[in-house]
Amino acid sequence: MSEQEELNLYDKISNGLKTSYENLLRRKAALGQDMVFADENGMPRIVPAKDALADYLHTNSSSAHHN
């Protein structure tokens, strides 16, 4: 596999993971569910999915939907 093919594969995998994560956030937000994240100390932190989705979209707004 050439270096370019590896880069293309990496991009496809990365974009697929981002899309999957965004879909998860959207589904959970629509259902009014929470997301559980680990904080900087490894402790669970519960966040409403709608808030997590808003943060995700704000953070990734410049690169969103450029698959």
Image (cartoon, rainbow, N blue to C red):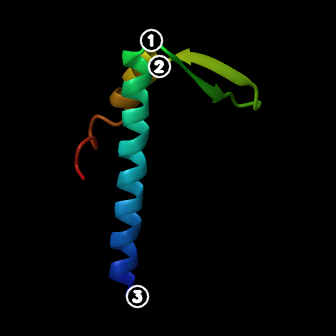
Callout 1: SS: loop
Tell me if 43 is positioned left or right of 56 in this view: right
Residue type at the position of mark 3? Met
Kindly identify which residue carries mark 1: 32
Q: Are marks 1 and 2 in contact (CB under 8 Å)?
A: yes
Callout 2: SS: helix
Q: How many marks?
A: 3
Where residue 54 is drawn, which disc sits there? none
Q: Residue at x 39, y 25 (%)?
A: 27
Q: Quadrant of residue 10?
A: bottom left
Callout 3: SS: loop
Query: Sequence-wise, which precedes: disc 1 or disc 2?
Result: 1
Residue type at the position of mark 2? Ala
Rendered position, 27 above or below 9: above
Label 3 crowd bin: few (<14), some (14–19), many (20+), radius 10 Å: few
Kindly identify which residue carries mark 3: 1
Rendered position, 60 above or below 1: above
Query: Sequence-wise, which precedes: disc 2 or disc 3?
Result: 3
Tell me if 47 is positioned left or right of 60 in this view: right
Label 2 crowd bin: few (<14), some (14–19), many (20+), radius 10 Å: many
Q: Residue furthest left?
A: 66
Where residue 49 is drawn, which disc sits there? 2
Residue type at the position of mark 1? Gly
Nearest-to-viewer mark from 1 and 3: 1
Q: Residue at x 44, y 22 (%)?
A: 28
Where residue 66 appears, as percent x and y from the top left, is 22, 49
Q: Residue furthest front?
A: 31
Query: Sequence-wise, which precedes: disc 1 or disc 3?
Result: 3
Where residue 63 appears, as percent x and y from the top left, is 28, 44
